[in-house]
Amino acid sequence: MATVAVATPYRAPRTERAKSIRRHVLIYLGLLPFLGLAVFPIFWMLVTALKQEPDLYRMDVVPFWFHLPPTWKNFDFLFHRTSYGDWIVNTMAIAFWVSAITLLTAVPAGYALARLRLPFAENLGIGIFMTYLVPGIILFLPLARVVSTLELQDSWWSLVAVYPTITIPFCTWLLMGFFKTVPFEIEEAAMVDGCGQLGALLRVVLPVSWPGLITAVIFSFTLSMQDFLYALAFVSVSDQKPVPLGVATELIRGDVYFWGSLMAGALLVGVPVAIVYNLFLDKFISGITGAAIK
Amino acid sequence: MSQIAAGGGPSPGAPATVAVGGRVRDISWWRTPTARRYLFGYTLLAPAVLYVALLVGIPFVFSLYLAVSDASVGVPVARFVGLENFKAALENSAFWTAVRNTVVFTLGAGIMKGLLGTALAFLLIQPFKGRRVVRALVVIPFTLPIAVSVLGWKWMFDSQFSVINWALSRLNLIGAYGSPEWPVWLGQPALALFSVMFVNVWRGFPFSAIVLMAGMTSIPPEIIDAGKVDGATFLQRFRKIIVPMIAPILFIGSAFDTVFTLSDLSIVYLLTNGGPDGATEILPTLAYNTGIKAGALGRGAAISLSLFPLLLPLMILLLRTLRRRQY
Amino acid sequence: MLDPRFSSERPHVSRRGFLRLTGAGVAGGALVTMLDARKAPAQLKGTSLRILMWSHFVPAYDTWLDDFAKKWGEKTGVKVRMDHIPHLELPARYAAEFAAGAGHDLIYFVGQILTGQYYRNLVDLSDLAEGLAKKYGAWMPASKSAGQVGGAWYGVPDFFISIPVLWRKDLLESVGVNNPDTWDDLRKAARLLKPKGHPTGMQFSHCNDANHNWRSLLYCFGGKETDPSGQNLTLDSKETREALRFAKALYDEGMTPEVFSWDDASDNRYLASGVACWVHDAISAFRTTQDTNPKVFEQTYVLPEAKGPVAHLNMGEPNVWAIWKFSKNVPAAKEFIQTIADHQKEAMEASRGYNMPFLKNQYTKPMPGLGGDAKLSALQEQDKITVFFGYPGPMTPAAQEVLTTFIVPDMFTRVARGADIEETMKWGMGEIRRIYTKHKAG
């Protein structure tokens, strides 16, 4: 709220430069608590990941820094003594296929619900959303049956089959909102030019909707990294696990936590995803804006 | 309910196609643009609806069946027991504690995320140097896999080696280790509930901020400027102009967030498993411990579905209102 | 050796043959010779066996076990795959495998003993279990509760985990408690040492250790969960009240509020960091301390269990083999159980004193892993004081639900926090009775 005062020019105007500096200082001051909140745990995880084990259990010295030389041992451990390499590959492959399935199903569904004035469209849309109210803690049992019927037990493909149940409803809603923002005129123009309805969708509507599509992909990507229970129930073989499951099941051994490797394992997937996220953030924002406001 | 709607997905289209045979000769209804649109529309819808119906709808019916049966993990054939399981849940004091905590957790975390997200979004839509870097940094909590970042928090909340306590203690805000003024984040009932909520907020507030940024950037600057000209103070502008404009996005954001929070097991499960003495027990953990770990599937299903009858109408109402507004 | 992880290689038996293992505990070569002693049925050749295991608290043991399985596989011609997951997550996996009707051939119960829930779907292993009893003397009495349902063995006990008292000799002697033997001694030590910055701690929270520790204390004070049939509740007694009262005093005098937030690993760290004067925890805590803080370890001693005013009982944690009926390779699974039972000695050695055997002859002194260690040798009579949850009744599904919903530790937590004992008793009994009624109705 500090910026409030800034936005309201109360005092006599100073030079532009001074004003800009003052504005920046206040914005940074306002951001500081947020940055601290968001970044401190990450910083702490990084320090933990690079610390030697005995260095973790000392309260007599400043814990924020190293008192024994930093070590790559925890990262080394991840790659050489666990299947972490496989976990990353699996996670990426799962995210890729889940995104693909989600787009292939949610794009047509969102378009149909938004544009084709179908009877029951509203109820169908709401029905799809309502699947979120079904608790996963029970759902995983019947799904186990499905997974084994498909002969996907203990393979990461089982998660490719299951995660779209989480991503499709969300992305359908998102895209439904988004398609509404595309002006009818451009679609009609395309149809006049001889495209069918499908052609109009593919050639005109999709190209202008790509912020929405990117948003859907980013969502699919993040949502498929948040699950733990399905992965636990369907995948028990080490080299088939995705990162969250692998890290949480193989780096805690009974009453010993391998803190350093745990943190290293989390950061190695979380931070790159954050960077990618940020690259697309503007598109993402316009994606959501389109989806929800119009 | 939802499944009935979803499962019935293809059928509303079906009468149209079925009717085709009967009507072909007289009016060729199926050749009308409307019929073709319907056919096209339901074809587009089918993959999503079928996917969801098969993988959520049918399993959901199965869990409904569990909730009214005396099923346990090792007994495939169960008897119908009516609402016995729900009755058992209602008689259980742990259930009511869990309901209370679930409501406090969801609402409390939701409000905190809303407030923090709004403030952050407001800061982030200002143009300033280093905006991209700041944005990249604040979204990290949202992109880390939850199961793992929770373990990071577990380490930070450790009763002995908590880095938070170390810092607070050096600042003389709390007592030394071993003194009663040394907070035990996951051990004192109110503090424990706050701590698990806090992790949820930490993870969720960047996302709230992004959603709200989207809302705020969609407000045409002229409107805000008009407000300024009229002499409205910031708070007035905020309340009268910004809030109403971003209300829809706020609603849909919180609707999604609420359902995700309600079903999120991992934070509580990994941090406290509901302890101490039920202080952080929420419905998902109670259902999981009863239904899966202790194997009483029927009662577990009943506990996990207990909020369903309340949430369903609420969500339908919310979504309908939202959609109406959009036109 | 400061980092416990690097005392052993990360075990792996995976499809890609990720094995780069060095045998721990027992030299691999010797093992092969020992395995040779037993002739495996020829028809096993070319089959495959999938085993689901927990992650053992002593990582070196998993290394040994994975290696053992690999060698066994080579010897018998069975393609073995051993998957490890944390013990807390096993029940979810079993529920999923059962629902799917497919999964691992040979499974393992620990923490949650689900023999009672799943026995209809488990292979009757009575021949195997009775054969073992004949070969190695009788099963200790508590093993029936872990493996039997209605007189038939649906699970074969592998070993149990003891949760003894680990105490600091230097600290306790400094306050005149030279050889702690009873709960009163421990209370006195904690009372005198807390002001000096060395409190004790037992978990008042929702974790496995909380279930164990408070039950051990409860049983030592004469509290009983049910009658021996496991059908009728007997927890509401003056002995239970006495145990609750004692726990409250122990907390007030000797612990800090930290204990309300603890998980299974916290007391390990408490001991290893040199703070605790004593903890009630498995040998893994002893080993962690050995690996991370040799100075404290030197002063850490083991008491099999403190004596209570009424009894001297320790609640152990059984580990049990079982075979799904839908298993695709029952003969190989049975053969594996038999072989590992025949190698209990090496297993104990590899577990660094953590695994406690179930069979009488295996208590011949000196016991492997224990007898040679002055601090651990007292554990060689652990079979005499070990009981399991539900005591004196068996581990029925009802007792299991009481365990997983943490009612007993919650009762102790309430009282420690200052709740009235009568109120707490009423609450706890209400919850427990509700659970038992449900199970009877089913």
Image (tube, coloured by chain):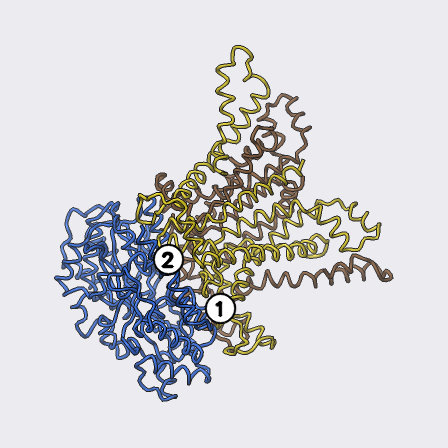
Chain colours: A brown, B yellow, C blue
Residue C345 locus on image (x, y percent)? 20, 66
Secondary structure beneath disc 1? loop
Q: Residues within 10 Å of mark 1 (few under 14, many from 20)?
A: many
Closer to us: B86 or B55: B86
Relative to B19, is C134 above or below?
Answer: below
Which residue type does callout 1 highlight? Gly
Which subunit holds the residue at mark 2? C
Residue C85 locus on image (x, y percent)? 36, 56
- Left or right relative to A64: residue B326: right
Secondary structure beneath disc 2? helix
Relative to C14, is C387 above or below?
Answer: below
Which residue type does callout 2 highlight? Arg
Disc 2 + disc 1, Cβ < 8 Å:
no
Relative to B44, is C208 above or below?
Answer: below
User: Residue B187 — which label?
Assistant: 1
Q: Quadrant of residue B275?
A: bottom left
Q: Quadrant of residue B138?
A: bottom right
Please name the residue shown 47% across and 67% down the image.
A71
Residue C116 locus on image (x, y percent)? 27, 55
Q: Does any portion of residue C283 appear in the rendered image?
A: no
Residue C413 locus on image (x, y percent)? 43, 69
Spatial separation of the CA atoms under disc 2 and disc 1 = 27 Å
Q: Nearer the viewer, mark 2 or mark 1?
A: 2
User: Residue B84 — which label?
Assistant: none
Q: Which residue is mark 2?
A: C434
- Left or right relative to B254: residue C191: left
Q: Residues within 10 Å of mark 2 (few under 14, many from 20)?
A: some
- Residue at the right extreme of this rendering: A12
Please name the residue shown 67% across and 50% down the image.
B213
